[in-house]
Amino acid sequence: MTNEPTEDVQRPFIVCPSCGRLTPGNVVQCVECGEPIAALVAAVAERRSEMRFAETVFSRMAPATWAIIAANVLVFILMVVAARTIEPGTFNYTFTLINFGAKQSSEIDAGEYWRLVTPMFLHIGLLHLFVNMYSLYVIGPQVERLYGTSRYLVLYVLSGIGGVLGSYLVDKVIVGGDVASAGASGALFGLLGVLIVFGWRHRNELPGVYRQAFSPRVFMPVLILNLVITFAVEFIDKGAHIGGLAAGGLLALVIPFARPGERSAGYAWWIAAALAVAAVGVSFSYAYRNADPLPDIDRFIAVYNASDKPLGIAGEAVEVAAAKSAVSIDTVEAIGEAALAIDASAGLDDRSRELLSERKLLLERAASLLGTDRSELNAETASALVADIERHRLAWDTWLEKSGSQFGLAKETKDTNSPGGNDGDQEGGSAGLWPDGLRDRTGCGDGWLHGSRQGSLAGAAGSWLQGNRQVARQVRREGEDGGRRERRDHGSAERDDYGRAACRL
């Protein structure tokens, strides 16, 4: 053994345990008797081990962490573009979130198992994305350098799946609800669980300073703080955080870390990592294939409003014509325009599509009865049409009450006695469909009339023609210019809860 100096110069001389004489404290052998000093030998070996651990482990790159951050940001940008909004809680955002693969227990029960993977790459708003990606930036490289890129990818994806499973089980067993949830926090809790178990499992083989740095005591305050926040904030998904933490901890018990001197993780781990990445890609491909087209709510509102007043006018016009009174050609043309305008909207769900088709048939039926050949027009057919129109409007009211709020819709009766109202309306107001809380967006309504028996039908039609006939033509042109929207038969898979704003993080 060489008499190599140590880095410890705090004690210039120490007593040799073999000969009892003083010897320099920075050499590992006694200068008097030549015997090695065990404490100094162990200290030198410990320092060398620490240096080797630091040089090997912390010189490793963390490409997977940056790739995951980039993937999350890319998915968020694609979501915002598809939703045409960055505001979480809006119908468009929630609809798109679920389209992209947010966790919904009912959909998983229906066989959409890819939703166990996709939620870890989805976020509910810019702040949610920033907090999670900053957390990943802090904790991800530590785990990746300890375990290597291949094993890290396996840990991240499986921890994320564990988080989604935890959320699913809590929903099914405890909560009993079906709230959409998304976010990388399940996987992040999994990485925290990995670090805690790593420090405990390998406490005897880590060199001194790193035994302290990776001690579970270091990470427990962070874990406790995050658990307090998890259970204190109502909208945070408790099941996802606990599920991810448990999954990460269990995985760290069986997956070895990349020890210093390990040249390669082996083909098996790279194959496992490739399968994990493939599972993510395949899951998002299923999300894309199963995505429903985003309903155009503004166009639906315009079509509904542009055809609602003409429907009332149509019923009264048929009654007037059945009584052998004159009906202007403008009234008939207005009814026909309204029927054609309905083609500009594909509806919002199966029931609204049925009702739009029914409204078009009623308008066409009225236009046919008011045509040049009125041989089938009599009091009986007029009364039947009016009754069908009333039933149709009641059906719309039922749909609005049951499903309208899911799309942020509300039906409002405008006061026609207020400035801008129409004094010719004897019934006090006109009903219109509006986005709830955004009731001035369409610019429709002030010229609408309920057909009044006590007023002039021609005058009522004329007022409508000055306002909403232009709207009917405009929405029809927009529908033609924009191309025919793809219409899909949603069947039994039609979701009735896209509008939930109570998403969980």
Image: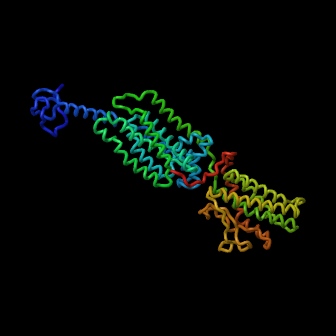
Q: Is residue 260 above or below residue 309?
A: above
Residue 61 appears anywhere in the view: no
Position of residue 477 measured from the top left corner of the image (x, y, whole percent): 69, 55
Residue 91 appears anywhere in the view: yes
Q: In this view, does 159 lie above or below 417?
A: above
Give me the residue at 64% from left, 55% from top: 297
Position of residue 505 measured from the top left corner of the image (x, y, whole percent): 50, 50
Q: In this view, does 133 lie to the left or right of 172?
A: left
Q: In this view, does 116 lie above or below 435?
A: above
Position of residue 356 measured from the top left corner of the image (x, y, whole percent): 73, 55
The residue furthest right is 375
Q: In which quarter of the image is residue 49?
A: top left
Give me the residue at 62% from left, 52% from top: 497
The residue furthest front is 173
In this figure, which colouring scheme has been used for the structure?
rainbow
Q: Is residue 402 left or right of residue 458?
A: left
Q: Quadrant of residue 442?
A: bottom right
The residue furthest top is 1
Give the number of marks. 0
- 250 and 313: which is toward the camera: 250
Q: Quadrant of the N terminus?
A: top left
- 481 and 472: which is toward the camera: 472
Position of residue 396 measured from the top left corner of the image (x, y, whole percent): 71, 59
- 366 and 159: which is toward the camera: 159
Q: In this view, does 188 lie above or below 228?
A: above
